[in-house]
Image (spheres, grey):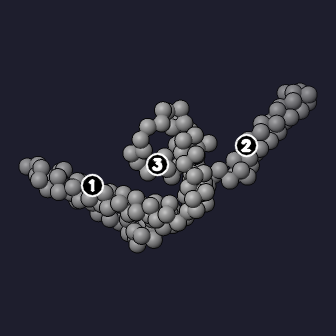
Amino acid sequence: MSHRMLKICLVVSLAANLLVLGAVGGFFGSGRHKDVRLDSLSTRHEARPRGPVTSLGPIVRAMDRKDRRDLGRMIQKAQGRDRRMDRDLRAQMTAVLADLLSTVPFDRTAVLAVLHDEVMTIEERQAIARDALLDKLASMTPEARAKLAQALLKGRK
């Protein structure tokens, strides 16, 4: 490889590295990394026609980041659980379900009971989240709620 080709390769490599560094720095510098999941979901819903809100997602996505964080803290406090306990409970339910699936003969009633317990846990968490959202909305000023209503109509950017 000639000396000139080596210089060209080094310059191209440096440019590519600076491009990647700039993209990563811009991502973290903008603060969007803190709400990646919520921000990426919100762009999918902007093109859809607005109908009645049947889930909490559109309202939560329309909130600004500070309000979403406050709501998350309220939900965690209301649940009174820590994540390790949740993981342990999920692992235990998975083990029980795996045991039931491998039993012969298949015990439909026992599997249904495990699935029902999981549905009840999900419904309980949804009720807690719904109550926390209502508490958060009630604590907001009328101006903040009006701003949230406008963001809900426009879709979160």
Tell me the kind of residue under disc 1.
Val
Camera-near label (1 vs 3) is 3
Q: Which residue corresponds to mark 1? A: 119
Which of these two is toward me, 40 or 56? 56
Q: Is 19 left or right of 96, judged from the image as shown?
A: right
Question: 21 above or below 74?
Answer: above
Q: Which residue corresponds to mark 2? A: 23
Q: Earlier in the sequence, mark 3 or mark 2?
A: 2
Tell me the kind of residue under disc 2.
Ala
Q: CA distance from mark 1 to mark 3?
A: 19 Å
Give the SS element for disc 3: helix
| Residue 28 seen by the camera | yes
Percent across and percent down for residue 150 are 58, 45
Q: Earlier in the sequence, mark 2 or mark 1?
A: 2
Q: Which residue corresponds to mark 3? A: 57
Percent across and percent down for residue 156 are 58, 44
Which of these two is toward me, 134 or 123? 134
